[in-house]
Image: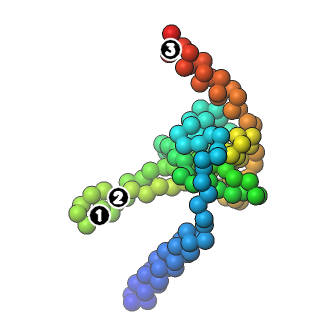
Amino acid sequence: MILTVFTACSGGETDSTEESQTHETTSEIPTEEAMIKESDAVKYIEESYTPEELGLDNTDRDYSFMVASSGVEIEEENYIKVVANVITKNDATTQDGKDTFSLETIGEYYISYDGEKVLKKDMESGEYSELENRYEAYKEKGETTQTTTQE
């Protein structure tokens, strides 16, 4: 019984150490130069691609998209990272009784700073595949909606 408790605690400590080491070696890449960023990046991914194209069609849970606040470098090119997450309520609560939640990332998508490439990361292999760039159609749709709203 003591061995089981020790093993469980030891495993938890290892995970947090690995996680903190990952954060220490990652430098923040500013996103000011990105053509598509912030909420526009989320809307672009969400509105331009089907769940099948994003690899989310077999997900039976509700998911939402979020964008990272700093850029990511992939093969010497900078990208905006958009993730699809499932939010799950945990059984545990905080010390003052408030609910806690966990985020599970089920999809990762990357838009190059110049807006020319959109990548989808395979969550199992870690490999990237390029999606069709639909930014012009997305932008035209937005301009059409804006014009219709103004009339």
When asked about the image quadrant of residue 124, the answer is bottom right
Q: Position of residue 149 (x, y in %)?
A: 50, 16
Q: Does 81 sit left or right of 118 as displayed?
A: left
Check disc 1: other Cα within 10 Å, few if <14, some if 14-19, many if 20+: few
Residue that carries the numbered disc 2 in the rendered image: 100
User: Which one is in front in this view, the residue at disc 3 or the one at disc 1?
Assistant: 3
Dot 3 lies on which element? helix
Total tally of numbered discs in the picture = 3
Find out whether the residues at labels 2 and 1 contact each other: C-beta distance under 8 Å: yes
Residue at left offset 43%, top offset 86%: 6
Q: Is residue 146 above or below residue 69?
A: above
Find out whether the residues at labels 2 and 3 contact each other: C-beta distance under 8 Å: no
Residue at left offset 35%, top offset 58%: 100
Q: Earlier in the sequence, mark 2 or mark 3?
A: 2
Amino acid type at image mark 3:
Gln
Find out whether the residues at labels 3 and 1 contact each other: C-beta distance under 8 Å: no
Q: Does 129 sit left or right of 109 as displayed?
A: right
When asked about the image quadrant of residue 59, the answer is top right
Residue at left offset 76%, top offset 58%: 76
Q: Earlier in the sequence, mark 2 or mark 1?
A: 1
Dot 1 lies on which element? loop
Q: Does 124 sit left or right of 63 as displayed?
A: right
State the CA–CA distance, disc 2 to disc 1.
7 Å
